[in-house]
Amino acid sequence: MASQTRSPATIISDGNDFGNVDWSNPGNAASSDNAYATADVGQNNGSTTYMLIAKNYGFSIPDGATIDGIDLNLEAKTAENGMHYDAHVWGVKAGVIDSDYDIATATTLTTSDAIYTKGGATGLIALGFTAFVADVNGSGFGIALMIQGTSDNDATVSVDHMPLTVYYTPSGGGGGSTGAGLLLTGVG
């Protein structure tokens, strides 16, 4: 099995469908450089962020390969230690968010950067569509992240990096079909 890890070239804050808190500087989540996309969330005012949509990862998975799995390695922190959030993650294919398949995970963030990894090399679960090589290599492929405050206090959530790793079996290397359910199991 082979893999590629890439960072998104495009990150936007999209409030068209969900949320009531805009992300500041969404493009800052493109690399691990301690420059952050930030949003103020907390239970007191029912805050939920807009979707932070990351796409255009620049994958170059070879034609004929089988997509085996995908990892999200979110690098994030909060302004107040021990704050609890619900992290919602959706798959994005051809620029369209699959909002029917929300994977929500309770998450406790720390005040220093930490990596919150979900996904894996195998054990695919479907998010309502299949991931083919052409999809993963396309500029519209990625993830959408929304954070909902569940703690008693308001705090700032800071996202430093949103890389994805795609695991695949090259053509002729065994495995199943060239399309598989997209593995993104949330953040936490």
Image: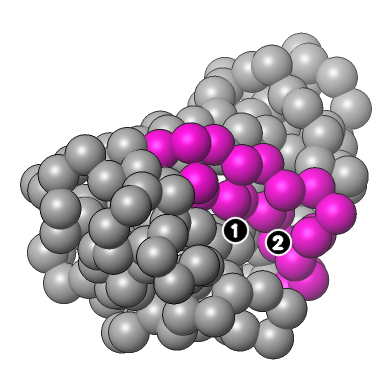
Query: What stretch of residues is rendered in magenta?
Result: 86-107
Tag on residue 92? 2
Magenta segment's dominant SS is strand
Q: Element type at marker 2?
A: strand
Q: At 71% from the left edge and 61% from the top edge, which residue is drawn?
A: 92
Side of 154 relative to 70 (left or right): left
Q: Residues within 10 Å of mark 2 (few under 14, many from 20)?
A: many
Q: At 72% from the left edge and 48% from the top edge, which residue is drawn?
A: 102
Label 1 sits on what residue type? Ile
Please provide percent x and percent y for residue 45.
44, 72
Q: Residues within 10 Å of mark 1 (few under 14, many from 20)?
A: many
Please provide percent x and percent y for residue 43.
42, 59
Task: Count numbered badges in the picture.
Answer: 2
- Quadrant the C terminus occupies: top left
Label 2 sits on what residue type? Val
Side of 114 relative to 86 (left or right): left
Instruction: Determine whether label 1 and label 2 are within 8 Å by CB.
Output: yes
Q: Relative to 122, is 100 above or below? A: below
Q: Relative to 166, is 95 above or below? A: below
- Quadrant the N terminus occupies: top right
If you read the primary sequence from the N terminus, does the residue marked by circle 1 or circle 2 appear first? 2
Q: Element type at marker 1?
A: strand
